[in-house]
Amino acid sequence: MPPALWLVALPIGAVPIVFLFRQVKLGAAIAAVMALFSAWLALRLPVGVVLNLLGRTIELDRLSQLTLALAFLATAVLFLIPLFSPSSASRSAHGGIKRGVERIFYPVGLAILGLFVVASLSRHLGITAIFIEAAAILTVFVIQGQRLDSIRAALRFLTLMSLATPLFLLAAWRIDLYQLSGGQIAAADLNQIVLFVSLGFALWLAIVPFHSWSTTAAAESSPTTAAFVLIIFPAVTFSILIHLLADLPWLVDSSQLVTVIIAAGVLTAFVGGMLAGIQRGFSELMGYAALFDAGAILTVLGIGGQAALITILVALCTRALALTLIAASTATLRLQVASDGFAHVKGLARRMPLASAGLIIGGLTLAGAPLTAGFATRWQLLRSIAEVNSYGPVLLALAGLGVAIGYLRGFRAILTLDDPSQNQPGRSQGSAPTFQEPGLLLLLVGLLILACILTGLFPSLIIEPLQRLTFGLTIPIG
Amino acid sequence: MPTLPEILSQLQIVSQETALLGLFLTACIVLIGRDWRVLILALLIQYVLVGVVLSRLTRPDIATLKVMIGAFICPILFLSARQVSARFRSMTWAINDADGEVHGAGWRPRVASVTRLLVGQSRRRRPAATGLIFRVFAALLMILVAITLSSTFRLPGLSASVNTAVFWLILAGLVTLVLTEDPLKVGLGLFTTLTGFELFYTTVERSLLLTGLWGAVNLLIALVIGYLIVVKGTGPEEEF
């Protein structure tokens, strides 16, 4: 078997074992170890053509290696969050919602990663789209978990992802026709391909106005599974988009495509940032902050240039870091309160200082605040867009400010002293004075905070290794 | 017993125009109707009619495969919806019994059951914003849009009538998706859209690998929609 296929075989092969042990912590531990090992393996495997299957090329390249390693690593850390949570917390129930929603996440998460590997290895847009669709179908179970109260997030995710696949199949058919014709393409055909590809990626990346799957998943799913969806899908999708532009540089000849990418990116970042500023809960806020971040990364891609690829990769890494930190912190807070709405978390900063700090630092990282890991990429984006558009920097800065305001409002809420006379709905009764933050979860949050601050103070820690790994790779824009 | 390809070849007596008219009606039912049994039957007929149209445009085995996929999808949806419906019916009877309602044998219950078959049995107590009249007008509007689009954008290799059918199915499905968050109706809307897409895509894409993978994905979508139907039916009623 070609070595690259181990990246598919290992996570999918581990699914039955993890499924059997999903009720006990051993399942989460096996899943985390498997994801961590796959991340290491992804970076160690040789690049190049893996095999030809039914006339289709299966190839592992440097960019796929990095995005897959990032996806596996982030998932491994996310698997640790429920593993480190106290067992009693996962069995308790609040408001009819079961808390052990992560159990199905371990086996299904591994299967999803296996499908993403196949999608990344394929060099045919149609096959890639079908495997992403298969991963999206499995993700429905992760988003839904064991909840019975609402299916809105899972349904919207499924619908929007399923609508994207036909668009990619049509684009792939047109691209095949172009390649069979020996490279002759009419302007009308090029416009059709651009239209299909633009709409398809807009659905996959949750670009405004197709953003509802992202924000609803963040609001309704558990923090861990929401972070998984918000990290993995955009990371793999950006990788596929960059591959497509690199493999088919004539797509960039369409001036409409570049304009559309920049406009969609700025619009998404602006809408995400503005709406983030008015949210009333940390889960909803995470969804809109991630939307802002996705818009910012898309804008970097549209502007292009020599530094675009490394900026995107660094942005995807900091996004994964920030979302993982937010998920770990929110999961810790939810051990104490049933809801992470601002009204329910009052006074938690005194009882859970590290988790509260993690939540705010993660949010500010997504906003691109100075001294956090997100600042370097956001600063690079503002400098790049200022060269091509005078309104862009203003809109993006306002959007970043909106995300920061959202998290600062949340910070004020958790700092506010709780009024014991008020018996708020959703607040756990009785356990507040004696509650101890779980040590291992705190250690994880502490390490993630440290990583956020260190990479914010010394961005070269993350930029230089990525530069070495992506030497020679460029985006054919700008 | 005749095989599915033989049944499809026997259905060649159905003219293309009749099949297209049938597709128009089934998509209308998916968009307007509410009773789950009628809706799933309409989807099944839709798949058979698409198979009849495709058997004239592409290889008969591919057309048969499409019908078979539809024939698998509809039972999945049916079983899920029936499970929820049985639970809902038992709950309704329990509530009615508690209220002291008499289940008489006169003409009124019969009229009520026929009405329910046409307009469906809503779980909501309050009237929906997207009522019957609204959906009828939406369908009429989409017919106009489909005709306009099909006369503006001609899809390669398709006759004018099939071209209109493709646009109609896609639009009817999309409007169904927009108008509801009920998982069964969302599923039917999604499959109607995907059927419209397949009516065109199957005629241009010759790759068996892609055709097979796409069929498998359709079945997986049906399974996951069935799961969501059951979850919604099991959980408390959701406010949309």
Image (cartoon, rainbow, N blue to C red):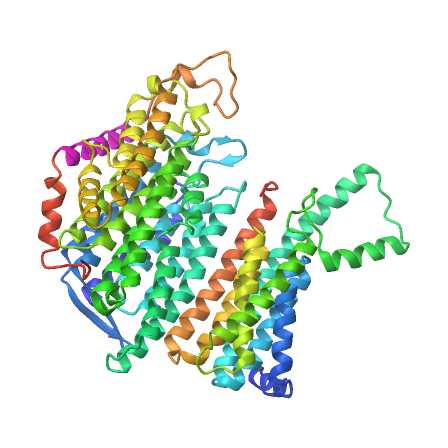
**Image quadrant containing the N terminus of chain A:** bottom left
**Image quadrant containing the C terminus of chain A:** bottom left
Residue at x 32% of width, y 79% of height: A177
| A397 left or right, relative to B201 | left
Task: Work out whether residue A38 can be spotted.
Answer: no
Residue at x 70% of width, y 42% of height: B125
User: Residue A92: x percent and y percent?
Assistant: 47, 31
User: Residue B39: x percent and y percent?
Assistant: 65, 63
User: Residue A149: x percent and y percent?
Assistant: 54, 40
| Placement of B68 over or under B94, stated as above or below | below
Q: Quadrant for residue A12, please give it.
A: bottom left
User: Of residues A30 and A431, which is closer to you in this image?
Assistant: A431
| B1 left or right, relative to A191 | right
Q: Is residue A247 magenta?
A: no
Task: Work out whether residue A394 can be spotted.
Answer: yes
Query: Farthest top residue?
Result: A421
User: Residue A119: x percent and y percent?
Assistant: 30, 62
Query: Farthest front residue?
Result: A390
Specify start and end residues of the magenta stretch as a single range: A438-457
Q: How many marks?
A: 0
Q: Is residue A454 magenta?
A: yes
Q: Quadrant for residue A472, please give it.
A: bottom left
Residue at x 26% of width, y 64% of height: A244
User: Of residues A322 and A267, which is closer to you in this image?
Assistant: A267
SS majority, magenta: helix
| A12 left or right, relative to A45 | right
